Structures are given as structure tokens and as C-alpha cells.
Image (spheres, grey):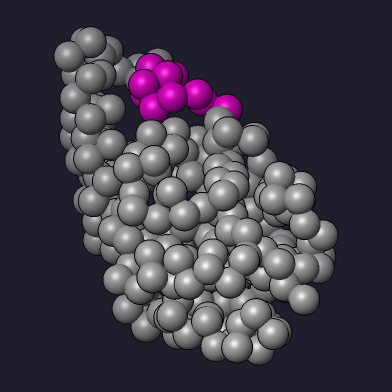
Amino acid sequence: MISAVVFDLYGTLVGAPPVDSYAAYAAGTATRLGFDPLKFPPIYDADYEGRQTGRFGTHEQYLRDLAQRLGVRLSESQLTALVQFRVDTVRSWLIVKPDAVSTLRSLRARGLRLGLVSDCGWETGLIWPSLSVAPLIDVPVLSYEVGVKKPNPRIFEIAVERLGVPPGQCLYVGDGGSDELAGARRAGMVPIMIDDPKDAVGHRPGYVAWSGPRIASLAELLSRRELGARGG
């Protein structure tokens, strides 16, 4: 019997960031740094894992490191503006899906423990507590805090350990980014894909196609057979 459900964040509880928004952010950052916008994306993308696993620390610390590597001089006011630009951009991506709160409340009413496993950087962690879904999640596991990201099974193991449930009793719901569904399965969890058509063109790093069970919305989760007697 499933006794806990762990969710991905981007593309699952919130929408996937639009591809054009991600590209606009990279171009805007390069312009503010005074660096060639055409040369910047490969450099920024190469730092993705480091940002996601906390290797660079806060976004301010990352920008200081990046500017040094690029040979760019930043004033404190420029640095503050760049950090705010990042926070504002990420906040614009963190739009909770319309059925997220009601679905989480229904799952909690059934006695299920709820968790989160997200590949994210410092700025997502800064904003997370303000989201309407945050109080409904018993255990949030953010990659930059634990130093490991999907699809490494360890990040999923941390979630089930903190939830206090065996992995085989834990359903994992995600959109397939970062090969997360296979990673959850290797950790012993029961994975299911949320294949929301509204997120079909979203920015999903490391997306891997999935042939296993899937749902089209969070609300659909409530009637899935994987939840057994508790799921109706």
C-alpha cells in the first residue's frame, strides 16, 4: 500500500518554465554582465549542475565566481541588481498549478505523507516557503541543499528516509526532467509521469521519454490504482 507521495516541482506542482523565458533570462544576464549574449549560454549551461548541487553557494556567490571567470568587473549595485533579476525571473516561473493545492489536501486527508524532490538552485529555495503548496508538503528535499541531484537515487532515498516510509510504499510523481522517473525507480519508489499538455514546450533539462504509467493532471492522481484502497 502507498503511504506517501513525493512530487517533483517544476513541470509538476508548478508549470515548466517557458523555453523563451529561459533564453530571455540568459540573454538578460549576459547583457547586465557586459558579456557577449551569444557566447554566454554555453558557459552558463556548463555551470548548471554546480548551481543545482550548491557548489557555488548563493546566487550572489555564483555571480562573483562567474564574473571572475569571465573577466568582468561588477559593482555591488550591479551584483544586487543581478541577484534580484534572477529571483524575479524564478518567481515568475513558480506558478502553482490550479489543481495542486486541492490535490495535496485530498491526499493528506487520506492520511498520506507528502514530499518534494526538486533539482533547483538557491533562489528556488528562497521562494519555496511562500508558495501555496509549501505548507502541504511534509518533507521538501532541494538538490542545492543536499548536494545531489536527479537522477541519482540518493536524492530520492533522502526523501523517503525523512518521510519515514519504505521506498516501495512511496509514489513519485514527476514530468520526466533529469531522468527522474528512472532514478526514482532505482531508489525503489513507484514512479508515475505527469504528462501535462500545457507543459509540452516547457524548459525541462535532461528530459527522458517515459513508457510507464502517466497522468495528464494532478487531480487525476486521486483516482489512480497505485494508491490502492486509500486512492479510491
Q: How would you classify the magenta stretch by its main secondary structure?
A: helix
Q: Split into 4 quadrants, where in the image is the N terminus?
A: bottom right
Q: Judge by depth and name the residue closer to the eye, 184 or 130.
A: 130
From the top left corner, tell me how far across and down residue 107 is, in percent: 54, 70
Q: Nearer the viewer, residue 167 or 69?
A: 167
Q: Residue at x 55, y 36 (%)?
A: 144
Residue 145, can we see it?
A: yes
Segment tinted magenta in the rendering: 55-65
The quadrant of the image that shows the C terminus is bottom right
Residue located 29% across and 54% down the image = 93
Q: Position of residue 160 (x, y in %)?
A: 73, 53
* Membership of 130 in magenta stretch: no
Q: In x, y percent, where is residue 111?
A: 62, 66
Q: Residue at x 23, y 30 (%)?
A: 84
| Front one among 224 and 143 | 224
Using the rendered view, name the quadrant where residue 218 is placed: bottom left
